Structure formats: C-alpha cells, structure tokens
C-alpha cells in the first residue's frame, strides 16, 4: 500500500490510502459481475435452445441424432428436455438468490457433457468449422463456470 506522510504540528504523520487499491477492487468486482451476467445468459440461451429442440422433436414425433451425447433417440429427447428444465430452474433460483450451488452444478454438468462428448468420446468432426464451434461452446461453458462460481464470493462491508 502506498503511504504518503505529511508532517503535522507535533511531528505526527497521517496515512492516505492509495486510490490504486480501490481501483483494483472495483475492477475485480466488475469482472465478477460481468462473468455472472455472461454465465446467466450463456446457460439461459443453451437451456432455451435445448428446450426448443426437445419440444420440436416430441411434437413432430421424430428422433434426435446428436452423436456427441451419450443418449440415443427418444431417450435423448427426454434427457434434453430434463436438462433444459433443470437449467431454467437453476438459473431462476440463482437469480433469486436461492440454491445458488445448483446453478454451479448445472454449469459444471454442461461443461462436462461438452468435453466428454466432443473431445473424450468417439465423436469425429466433419470439418474445422465444426471443431471451432465445439471449442467455442466448450470455452463458453468454462467461462460460465467461473461466472457461476463468482456468486459465492464473500461481500465485505465498508
């Protein structure tokens, strides 16, 4: 901490706190807030997409074929529906300040499914564009984990 000493009448000194420390604190708080907003939006868009995909599959009577996921046909449709509903509930509860750990667990599960499905399983990419999309989705899910985790930071009172 930067200290500036000034002489007073009786030889005492006073310390002036550096504004640099306050600026760093503010910057970290802003980064945490932006990560939280990003994680809510990322997981919300993903959950809405999965909900729509599963509902279209159910209403049309056709089976989904997503080779990167461990489920097949009708089972895949209902798993996606379940994951979407759980995701929407966890986002809502975290946003309301209740059961925040559930949102972190959901974010970890999504990241795990992406890593396992795209990179650890037997999935083969059709080209570099699909590979780049998989990398972007996986990196986005990783950032969402940091945003979900940042909601557990203790807040200090002034």
Image (cartoon, rainbow, N blue to C red):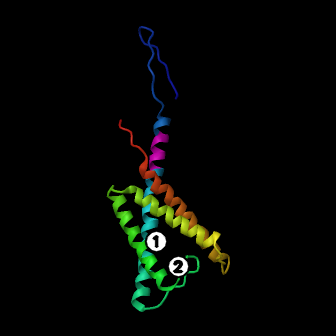
In screen coordinates, is 116 left or right of 148? right
Residues in magenta, as a range: 23-30
- According to the picture, the residue beneath numbered tag 2 turns out to be 71
Residue 103 position by quadrant: bottom left
Residue plotted at (47% across, 56% down): 147
Disc 2, SS: loop
Q: Which residue is mark 1?
A: 46
Against 21, residue 148 (above or below) is: below
**Magenta span has 25?**
yes
Question: Is 103 rendered above or below residue 65?
Answer: above
Whether residue 31 appears in this view of the structure is yes
Q: Quadrant of the C terminus?
A: top left
The answer to whether mark 1 and mark 2 are in CB contact below 8 A is: no
Residue 30 tag number: none
Marked residue nearer the N-terminal end (1 or 2): 1
33 sits to left or right of 117: left
């Amino acid at each position: 901490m930067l200290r500036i000493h000034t002489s007073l009448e009786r030889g005492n000194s006073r310390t002036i706190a550096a504004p640099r420390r306050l600026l760093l604190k503010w910057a970290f708080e802003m980064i945490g807030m932006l990560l939280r907003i990003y994680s809510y939006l990322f997981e919300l868009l993903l959950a809405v997409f999965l909900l729509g995909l599963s509902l279209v599959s159910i209403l049309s009577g056709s089976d989904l074929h997503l080779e990167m996921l461990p489920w097949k046909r009708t089972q895949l449709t209902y798993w996606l529906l379940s994951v979407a509903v759980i995701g929407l509930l966890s986002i809502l509860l975290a946003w309301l300040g209740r059961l925040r750990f559930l949102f972190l667990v959901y974010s970890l599960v999504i990241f795990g499914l992406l890593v396992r499905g795209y990179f650890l399983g037997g999935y083969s990419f059709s080209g570099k564009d699909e590979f780049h999309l998989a990398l972007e989705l996986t990196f986005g899910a990783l950032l969402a984990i940091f945003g979900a985790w940042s909601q557990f930071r203790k807040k200090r009172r002034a």
